[in-house]
Image: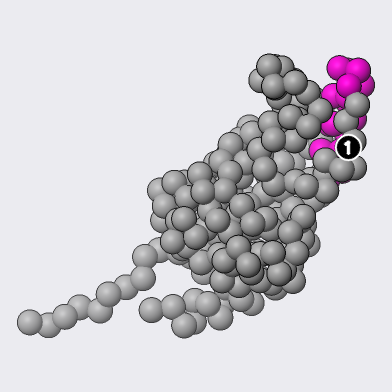
């Protein structure tokens, strides 16, 4: 019997959004400031944007009582559209990283804790063109979407992103461009830590060159 060579599955790379593909700090800061003014509630917006990554309600719980988090969260997401989208730039290397995946014949997907409609607004505003955007997923919960899309690589800036990649059985590529430094990302189980996304296209080419 002649054994046919086993080919690798089609390439799919997942990307986190905040502080991986986009620098969301200016927009989120403006949205928190608007929410604070509207609700007459103290929110330290500078502190809030220093710990981006977990779901919105985790941050809101520092400033609002538990029983109001649902209503306040919904209002924040409405405010966000007006205050955050236009203020948010792409991270260096974001556009090139998505293009590098497409150049290899692969699919680039975004898997993020951010509200999915707002994540899509960011992509449209910046002219970034992932093949899918999946929102409202954090840490290990990201694994389901990554597995469903057969992602073999997941790129993120937070230890929660590393945990999601590990849970999905994907290669965890981390960039210390958010609240977690390189040592934290390695300790969480990142397979690769790059200085930032500008290094991703070269890493991907090398990775694919040795992939079975």
Q: Give how far across and how far down residue 112 sits, in percent.
A: 61, 45
132 vs 78, nearest the viewer? 78
Q: Nearer the viewer, residue 154 or 109?
A: 154
* Quarter containing the N terminus: bottom left
Q: How is the image coloured?
A: one colour
Question: From the viewer's perspective, is residue 147 above or below residue 79?
Answer: below
- Name the magenta segment's main secondary structure: helix
Q: Is residue 106 left or right of residue 198?
A: left
Nearer to the camera, 182 or 13? 182
Relative to 102, residue 129 above or below: above
Q: Position of residue 41 (x, y in %)?
A: 88, 21
Residue carrying label 1: 45
Residue drawn at (60%, 54%), measured in percent from left and top? Answer: 161
- Res. 201 image quadrant: bottom right
Residue 180: image x %, image y %?
74, 59
Q: Where is residue 153 drawn, in percent x and y?
A: 51, 63
Q: Is 88 situated above or below 1? A: above
Q: Which residues are magenta?
A: 25-41
Residue 32 on the magenta span: yes
């Amino acid at each position: 019997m002649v054994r046919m060579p086993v080919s690798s599955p089609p390439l799919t790379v997942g990307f986190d959004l905040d502080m991986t593909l986009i620098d969301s700090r200016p927009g989120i800061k403006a949205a928190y400031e608007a929410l604070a003014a509207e609700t007459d509630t103290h929110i330290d917006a500078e502190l809030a944007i220093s710990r981006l990554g977990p779901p919105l309600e985790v941050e809101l719980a520092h400033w609002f009582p538990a029983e109001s988090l649902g209503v306040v969260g919904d209002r924040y997401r409405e405010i966000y559209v007006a205050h955050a989208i236009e203020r948010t730039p792409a991270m260096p290397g974001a556009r090139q990283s998505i293009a590098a995946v497409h150049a290899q014949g692969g699919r680039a997907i975004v898997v993020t804790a951010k509200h999915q409609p707002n994540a899509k607004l960011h992509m449209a505003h910046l002219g970034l063109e992932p093949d899918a955007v999946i929102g409202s997923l954090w840490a290990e919960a990201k694994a389901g979407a990554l597995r469903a899309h057969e992602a073999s690589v997941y790129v993120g800036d937070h230890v929660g992103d590393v945990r999601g990649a590990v849970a999905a059985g994907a290669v965890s590529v981390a960039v210390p461009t958010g609240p977690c430094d390189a040592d934290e990302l390695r300790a969480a189980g990142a397979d690769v830590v790059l200085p930032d996304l500008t290094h991703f296209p070269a890493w991907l080419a090398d990775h694919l060159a040795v992939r079975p």
